[in-house]
Amino acid sequence: IAIKDLQERNGYSEELARQIVTGGGVKIYTTMEPAVQKALDATFQKQELFTADYSRVVNMPELPEAGMAVINNKTGAIAGMQGGYGDKQSNLVINRATDIQRQPGSVTKPINVYAPAMEMYKVTGATILEDKKVFLDPGNPEEPYPKNAYYPEYRGRMTLRNALKISNNVPAAEVMLMIGVDSSKYFMQKVGIDRTDDSASISMAMGGYETGMCPLEIASAFTVFPTGGLYTPHYAYTKVVDSLGNVLLENRPSYEQVYRPGVAYMMTKVMEETLEGRTSNFPYEGSAAGYGMLKNGVGEIIATSGKTGTTDEDVDKWFCAFTPYYTGAVWYGFDNRIKKQSVIGPDNEGAKRIWFDAMRVIHTDKPAAGWTQPADIVELKICIQSGKLASYSCGSGNVVSEYFEKNSPLTPQSVCPLHGGRPITPFGSAKSLPVVTEPTTSTTGSTAPSQSTTNPLSPDGAGTDPNQGPPQPPQPEIPPDSGGTPPPETMPSTGP
């Protein structure tokens, strides 16, 4: 990373930059945390994490590989990374945490669809979306697109929370159409993933991009959630000093308010569902069910939220999740240097196995921790059938907690129309702040005001300076053609 920075910031040639860094006499003050790196090194030595049944892959042209990056949420610094299974055989080999460009699949849904839509006052966790047959591929209008990677293929009406829980594709595409592709690209750029020149369109809702991504990019982008909507670009060192003491490079993190703190919190709570089994009458488990939240060495819970990702034909497996302390992303699959190979059988869990093995060790000595709920967030009981305030007539299996901004026009004020009755959450419980209007849009360019701040995170890494109110939300303008679709070949069908 320092070599690349010397080229980009100081204008050095690659040869000169490499000579400076590797030739001796240069001090690099790394952000690597020894305990984090030690945990990653140990995890990437465990063959059983890379293949649950070695006999299934021993005759394959390649063995499964992985890359993982972990970022300290409080500072935005890279705490550790690992680029492949086993011992490092030589210098300058591929680092799968930073050097790959693989399709991300559904792992990007929180950062390119759902959080942007929440920021734009389009949806909440209770918004009802419908998983049904749709035809969104203009190149093949007779063929349903997008599809889902499970059976039954379409599962009807569901809340946004449950759509993300099972990584449903049709609702994600529906929300992408609500916000427009340019707005999606805008918010992705705000968290360090610039795909403004990518010609893919609706396929982005399912993680179908022309240019793939690496674990470091994904992990860095997801830090916007545990930090109360603040983003700072990741960095691997604080400074680079030459033999004479001259500072060649220096990183001073700057923070930008990408999402309102309430949006970051709501999205974080929705992503907890990924790790859950059945929690209501909704008959499906989360795409990472069975893993649950992390616990420290004495069994205390450390809040955990995340998202899985799978690409077409099970070629790539992703898992990105975060705690109040760290955010980590894992890619798992084959290098495909000889031929394209799919991840099969129990190894579909590879990315999740690796993430949890490393992160359990990393959090062993951490105190129990949860998410800091912003003052403008209210918890309401809603009915999963309607997305409205639940009544005692809805039945306990249909009643769940959901989180809303008090000042949002989308916060439900009426009782469930399907069941009627007396609401469990009293009327007016979310009316303590005045209702705001939805951000305006226009049919011209795609620029949005920058919301920058130099305030660091609060000591617990949970949000912004409490003495400063949250900035107004960005208001990206949506051109009329932003909901278009690319040619079929750029539109893979992805799964959880």
Image (tube, helix red, strand yellow):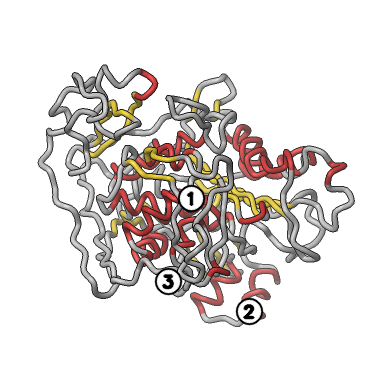
Q: What is the three-letter code of the residue carrying label 2?
A: Glu
Q: Residue furthest front?
A: 142
Q: Which residue corresponds to the image point at 68% horizontal and 75% vertical from the top-left? A: 19
What residue is shown with label 2?
A: 14
Closer-to-camera residue (452/285): 285
Helix or strand or loop: what does disc 3 sit on?
loop
Q: Quadrant of the C terminus?
A: top right
Q: Quadrant of residue 26?
A: bottom right
- As drawn, the label of residue 119 is none
What residue is shown with label 3?
A: 196
Q: Do the residues bearing badges 2 and 3 touch, measured as CB atoms within 8 Å?
A: no
Q: CA distance from mark 1 to mark 2?
A: 42 Å
Q: Residues within 10 Å of mark 2 (few under 14, many from 20)?
A: some
Indicate which disc, 1 or 3, sits on the residue closer to the N terminus: 1
Indicate which disc, 1 or 2, sits on the residue closer to the N terminus: 2
Q: Position of residue 304 (x, y in %)?
A: 49, 34
Q: Residues within 10 Å of mark 3 (few under 14, many from 20)?
A: some
105 sits left or right of 403 in the view = right
What residue is shown with label 1?
A: 169
Q: Which residue corresponds to the image point at 38% horizontal and 61% vertical from the top-left? A: 184
Q: What is the three-letter code of the residue carrying label 3?
A: Thr
Q: Which residue corresponds to the image point at 58% horizontal and 43% vertical from the top-left? A: 150
Q: Position of residue 35 (x, y in %)?
A: 62, 39
